[in-house]
C-alpha cells in the first residue's frame, strides 16, 4: 500500500496572487518501527562477538591466572624446601620426615606434601610431562661466607654452616587448546632457593 504525504507551499506570483502548490511523496507503508529488521542482525553479531572474542578472552585470563598461581607456588615451594633442609643437617636428631637428610628423595616427598590446592600433579619420570613436580638438591660444601665448609672433605657437605640449594620444577598444563598451541602443550616453571644449614 502506498501512503501519500502532502506538503503545501504558499507563495506569490508576479501579479501578487497567491499560489498554492501541493506535492505528493509516495512512500511504502511500514509497520511503524523502522529498526525491526535490524534486531535479528544485532543478535547474530552479539553471538559472534561473544563466541569468538569474549569467551576466549575470559578463559585465557583464567588460564594465565592459573599459570601465575602455579609459578608463585613453585617459588614458595623452593623456599619452603630449603627451610625444611636447613634444620635437617648432619647434626639433626629427632625430627619428623627423616633426619639427617643427605639425598634428594626426602626433599621430593616433602615438596609433594606441600602441594597447594589447584596444583595439578601427575606421576612422571621426565620433567616434560604436564603436571610433573620434580626437585633437585645440591649440597655444595661451600659455606655462607663462600669458603669450604667441609674442612677439606673431613666433614659432610650437609653440616651446619654449609649451603644447600633446592630447585623445584613444575610443568604447568594449559587447559585451553589455543593457548597450548601458542606456548606448547605445557610450560615448565623453575625456582631455586639457597640457604645455610643451621643444624
Image (tube, rainbow, N blue to C red):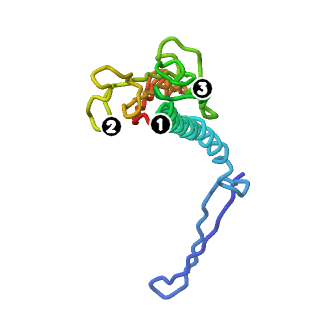
State left or right for residue 25 relative to residue 83. right
Q: Residue at x 47, y 34 (%)?
A: 199
Mark 2 or mark 1, which is nearer to you? 2
- Between 91 and 10, which is closer to the camera in this rendering? 91
Q: Residue at x 27, y 22 (%)?
A: 152
- Between 8 and 76, which is closer to the camera in this rendering? 76
Going from the N terminus, do you reach mark 3 or mark 2 first? 3
Label 1 crowd bin: few (<14), some (14–19), many (20+), radius 10 Å:
many
What residue sits right under mark 1 in the picture? Answer: 79
Mark 3 or mark 1, which is nearer to you? 3
What residue sits right under mark 2 in the picture? Answer: 144
In the image, which disc is placed on residue 139?
A: none
Mark 3 near mark 1, Cβ–Cβ under 8 Å? Answer: no
Tag count in the figure? 3
Q: CA distance from mark 3 to mark 1?
A: 17 Å
Secondary structure of the residue carrying tag 2 is loop
Q: Residue at x 43, y 27 (%)?
A: 167
- Between 103 and 192, which is closer to the camera in this rendering? 103
Going from the N terminus, do you reach mark 2 or mark 1 first? 1
The percent coordinates of residue 28 (x first, y second) are 66, 53
What residue sits right under mark 3 in the picture? Answer: 97
- Between 27 and 114, which is closer to the camera in this rendering? 114
Q: CA distance from mark 3 to mark 2?
A: 25 Å
Q: CA distance from mark 2 to mark 1?
A: 16 Å
Amino acid at each position: 500500500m502506498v501512503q501519500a504525504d502532502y506538503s503545501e507551499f504558499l507563495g506569490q506570483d508576479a501579479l501578487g496572487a497567491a499560489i498554492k502548490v501541493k506535492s505528493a511523496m509516495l512512500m511504502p507503508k511500514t509497520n511503524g518501527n523502522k529498526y525491526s529488521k535490524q534486531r535479528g542482525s544485532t543478535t547474530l553479531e552479539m553471538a559472534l562477538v561473544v563466541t569468538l572474542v569474549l569467551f576466549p578472552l575470559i578463559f585465557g585470563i583464567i588460564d594465565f591466572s592459573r599459570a601465575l598461581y602455579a609459578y608463585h607456588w613453585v617459588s614458595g615451594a623452593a623456599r619452603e624446601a630449603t627451610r625444611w633442609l636447613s634444620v635437617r643437617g648432619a647434626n639433626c636428631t629427632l625430627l619428623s620426615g627423616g633426619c639427617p637428610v643427605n639425598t634428594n628423595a626426602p626433599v621430593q616427598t616433602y615438596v609433594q606434601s606441600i602441594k597447594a590446592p589447584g596444583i595439578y600433579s601427575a606421576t612422571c619420570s621426565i620433567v616434560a610431562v604436564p603436571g610433573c613436580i620434580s626437585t633437585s638438591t645440591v649440597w655444595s660444601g661451600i659455606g655462607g661466607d663462600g669458603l669450604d665448609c667441609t674442612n677439606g672433605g673431613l666433614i659432610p657437605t650437609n653440616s651446619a654452616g654449609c649451603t644447600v640449594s633446592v630447585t623445584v620444577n613444575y610443568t604447568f598444563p594449559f587447559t585451553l587448546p589455543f593457548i597450548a598451541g601458542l606456548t606448547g602443550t605445557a610450560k615448565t616453571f623453575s625456582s631455586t632457593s639457597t640457604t645455610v644449614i643451621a643444624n
